[in-house]
Amino acid sequence: MSVSTQLEQIQKKKAELKNELQSMEHKERGLGESIKVLEEKMMIHDLEERVKAKRAIVERLEFRKRDLEKRLKEPQKKPDPSQMPHRPTPAPQAADKAEEPQRREPMEVTVSAAPAGNQHPKQSAAPAGPQQPKKPEEKKEKQEEKKKRKWF
């Protein structure tokens, strides 16, 4: 093989490699730009999801605010029996005592406005006169009632 033939083959190989390098660089730039576009789309998608979640939270809060404002504007109604604290029913008395008229103590009822986070107003019924110390059963019932009223 002559030197001129070898030189031609080397130059040909060099031109092929330059073209391949230029093609690879062009492809690299294109892939880099595609990656940037996809990353931006992912950030947009993440932001859309966060906005969607925040919008749902705001809508719930607005609904709660409207509901509370509506309740505030409504005239006071008689308390709903389902909201009254549960009181155990007294056991039936013997037949001879049933004939005697029962004497009832006057009751004092206190109703106070509920705090902003509470759905139901607090209500209590206590006999008029000196207050007696609470029994353990009453304390337990009161604690259970508080648990039922919690929202969150």
Image (cartoon, rainbow, N blue to C red):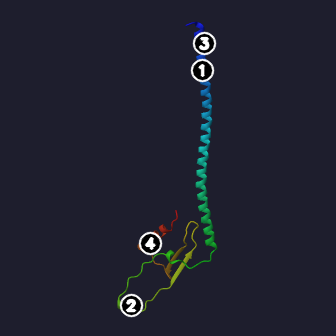
Rounded to the nearest angstrom, the CA distance separating label 3 from label 1 is 12 Å
- Between label 2 and label 3, give the one nearer the viewer: 3
- Between label 4 and label 3, give the one nearer the viewer: 3
Q: Amino acid at mark 4?
A: Glu
Rounded to the nearest angstrom, the CA distance separating label 2 from label 4 is 29 Å
Image spot of residue 38 (x, y percent): 60, 41
Rounded to the nearest angstrom, the CA distance separating label 2 from label 3 is 127 Å
Measuring 60% from the left and 34% from the top, which residue is drawn there?
31
Q: Which residue is mark 2?
A: 98
Of 26 and 96, which appears nearest the observer?
A: 26
Rounded to the nearest angstrom, the CA distance separating label 4 from label 3 is 101 Å
Using a 10 Å C-alpha cutoff, classify the residue at mark 1 as few (fewer than 14 neighbours), some (14 to 19) or many (20 or more).
few
Q: Secondary structure at mark 2?
A: helix
Q: Are marks 3 and 1 in contact (CB under 8 Å)?
A: no
Outermost residue, top direction?
Answer: 2
For the N terminus, give its image quadrant.
top right
Check the image and report above or below for 127 versus 17: below
Q: Which mark is residue 16?
A: 1
The total of numbered circles placed on residues is 4
Q: Secondary structure at mark 3?
A: helix
Rounded to the nearest angstrom, the CA distance separating label 2 from label 1 is 115 Å
Image spot of residue 95 (x, y percent): 35, 90
Using a 10 Å C-alpha cutoff, classify the residue at mark 2 as few (fewer than 14 neighbours), some (14 to 19) or many (20 or more).
few
Q: In the rendered structure, which disc, 3 or 1, sits on the residue that comes first in sequence?
A: 3
Left or right of 35? Residue 147 is: left
Q: In the rendered structure, which disc, 4 or 3, sits on the residue that comes first in sequence?
A: 3
Rounded to the nearest angstrom, the CA distance separating label 4 from label 1 is 90 Å
Q: Which mark is residue 8?
A: 3
Q: Which residue is mark 4?
A: 141
Check the image and report above or below for 93 versus 86: below
Image spot of residue 32 (x, y percent): 61, 34
Q: Amino acid at mark 1?
A: Glu
